[in-house]
Amino acid sequence: MRRKLAAGNWKMNGLKADLREVAALLTDRPASGCEVLLCPPATLVAAMAMTAAGRIAVGGQDCHAAQSGAHTGDISAQMLKDAGASHVILGHSERRADHGETDAVVRAKTEAALAAGLVAVICLGETETQRDAGETLAVIGAQLEGSLPEGLTGATCVIAYEPVWAIGTGRIPSLDQIAEVHDFLRDRLVARFGAEGATMRLLYGGSVKPSNASEIFATSNVDGALVGGASLKAADFGAIVAAL
Ligand code: PEP
């Protein structure tokens, strides 16, 4: 049985004052059995972990593949762990697009995350052009092969399907399209990782809101969501948590 996961990605948003949203989420948290994860910018990881006090998990949004060294401005997996993170998002499409991250880079970062004891939340997704060209499953399959290292388990990774064209746009794929990709991912994970592949959680991400969360969560092989904009406010994110 896979435990549902509601994960929030604050992206480059959030100052110390915004931790009140975490406090509000903890106070008003709906009685849901799902796991809750928030990934603030690196500057807030330690403070959010203090506020969360273990009641929700805290994660980073990226890490370097190296443990330490001459990488100005970067942050290592070990540093995130030291700051109180338990997870790290890797291979988000904004990192792939803005920082030229390839599948090989995502794979190396995932290995670093695992070595530091973090759970890797690995993102995959097609662009609109690729979907229109009928390439969605081929693109996702190639990203899955290239971005995931050997030896992953359901305890060490979470996979997030995030169609690039659905992120921050208010548009989502049809439920059939989400199911098609998630079923495909499940088959591929089981083919590659055996029984462990059946235990890996598959999140959908891209314009998830309180108004569409329930129907998305009822879709085949959807084990939760990776939420951007709607994770910034406790009222919205709490409603999504309640829908799981
Ligand atoms: C994301 O950034 O991972 C995301 C899914 O964003 P949004 O929910 O805002 O579309």
Image (cartoon, rainbow, N blue to C red):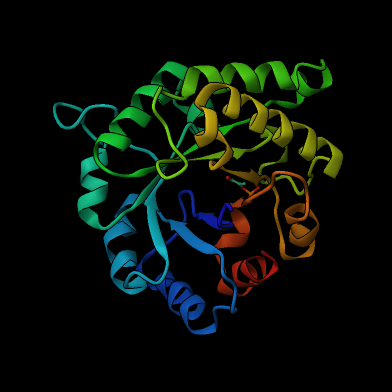
Q: Nearer the viewer, residue 233 or 33?
A: 33
**Residue 154, relative to residue 232: is it above or below?**
above
Examine the image and state in which quarter residue 61 appears. Answer: top left
**Residue 8, relative to residue 236: is it above or below?**
above
Where residue 107 sits in the image (x, y, percent)? 40, 23
> Please, which residue is most extreme toward the left here?
69
Where residue 94 sits in the image (x, y, percent)? 53, 34
Tell me: 104 left or right of 83: right
Q: Nearer the viewer, residue 60 or 14?
A: 60
Tell me: 156 left or right of 201: left
Residue at the (76%, 52%) spot, across then down: 216
Residue at the (38%, 58%) spot, across then down: 58
Q: Quadrant of the C terminus?
A: bottom right
**Residue 185, relative to residue 24: is it above or below?**
above
Residue at the (68%, 45%) spot, across then down: 206
Question: How many callouts does the rendering have?
Answer: 0
Examine the image and state in which quarter residue 204 appears. Answer: top right
Examine the image and state in which quarter residue 137 appears. Answer: top right
Tell me: 213 left or right of 33: right
Residue at the (42%, 45%) spot, across then down: 155
Where residue 196 sits in the image (x, y, percent)? 50, 36
